[in-house]
Image (spheres, grey):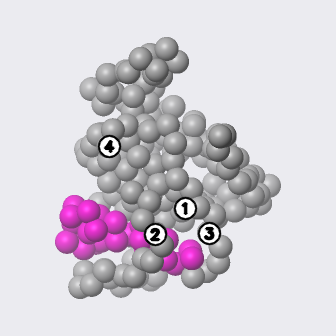
Amino acid sequence: MRYRRAFTPGATLFFTVVTHDRRPILESAQAVDLLRAAFRSVRQSRPFHIDAMVVLPDHLHCVWTLPPEAADFATRWRLIKTWFTKHCPAALRAPQDATRAARQEQAVWQHRYWEHRVRDEEDYARHVDYIHYNPVKHGWAASPALWPYSSFHRHVAAGIYPPDWGHAAPPHHEGIGHE
């Protein structure tokens, strides 16, 4: 069976992208900076807006909004992963298995990723909350404000969240669990 993705011009989408074998290759500030550079490079030629994002040591979540004429998020992800892989230190690459070696691929990212087209404002808010609470959910921070690799800080500055949001009790995220 062949998996087919739905492409909608101008869509807003939620993504989960995971490292190969859940290796914590994104745990250093240098690795996160390299990932940021990959995003900047790809956005120059294939624009999209990052509405919300969090980077954890072994995976990331984000919400993107594509330009009205654009629907091809798959190429954008391929280019981001490729750029990061080409520029990352060799120590971040896992040994290749036979399949990856035959295809001349590096073992940095899982082949697939999970995407969900955001349906409405409520769905959007639920996914953005999920992204920002994720470091707390996984035990990396006591509150979203304490995790440095997140758009949470940008959302606080814009007045969308109070600085102490998510500290006392987790927000409700029914139906979101793509880890």
Q: Is the magenta stretch mostly helix, strand or loop?
A: helix
Residue, x 31% and y 27% (percent of image)?
A: 94
Residue 118, label in figure: 3
The reply to whether the C-beta atoms of the residues labelled 1 and 3 are less than 8 Å apart is yes
Q: Quadrant of the C terminus?
A: bottom left
Q: Mark 2 and mark 1: span between their CA atoms?
A: 10 Å
Residue hosting label 1: 14
Left or right relative to 172: residue 113? right
Spot the residue most to the right.
69
Q: Mark 1 and mark 3: span between their CA atoms?
A: 7 Å
Mark toward the start of the polypeptide (2 vs 1): 1
* Of marks 2 and 3, the one in the foreground: 2
Q: Mark 4 and mark 3: span between their CA atoms?
A: 26 Å
The reply to whether the C-beta atoms of the residues labelled 2 and 3 are less than 8 Å apart is no
The picture places residue 169, in percent across and down from the top left corner, at: 27, 84
Mark toward the start of the polypeptide (1 vs 3): 1
Residue hosting label 2: 176
Magenta includes 142?
yes
The reply to whether the C-beta atoms of the residues labelled 2 and 1 are less than 8 Å apart is yes
Residue, x 37% and y 50% (percent of image)?
A: 59
Q: Where is 89 relative to 30, above or below?
A: above
Magenta residues span: 123-147
Badge 1: how crowded within 10 Å, few (<14), some, or many (20+)? many
Give the amino acid type for the residue marked by disc 1 in the picture.
Phe
Q: Mark 1 and mark 4: span between their CA atoms?
A: 19 Å
Left or right relative to 58: residue 178? right
The picture places residue 24, in percent across and down from the top left corner, at: 27, 43
Residue hosting label 4: 22
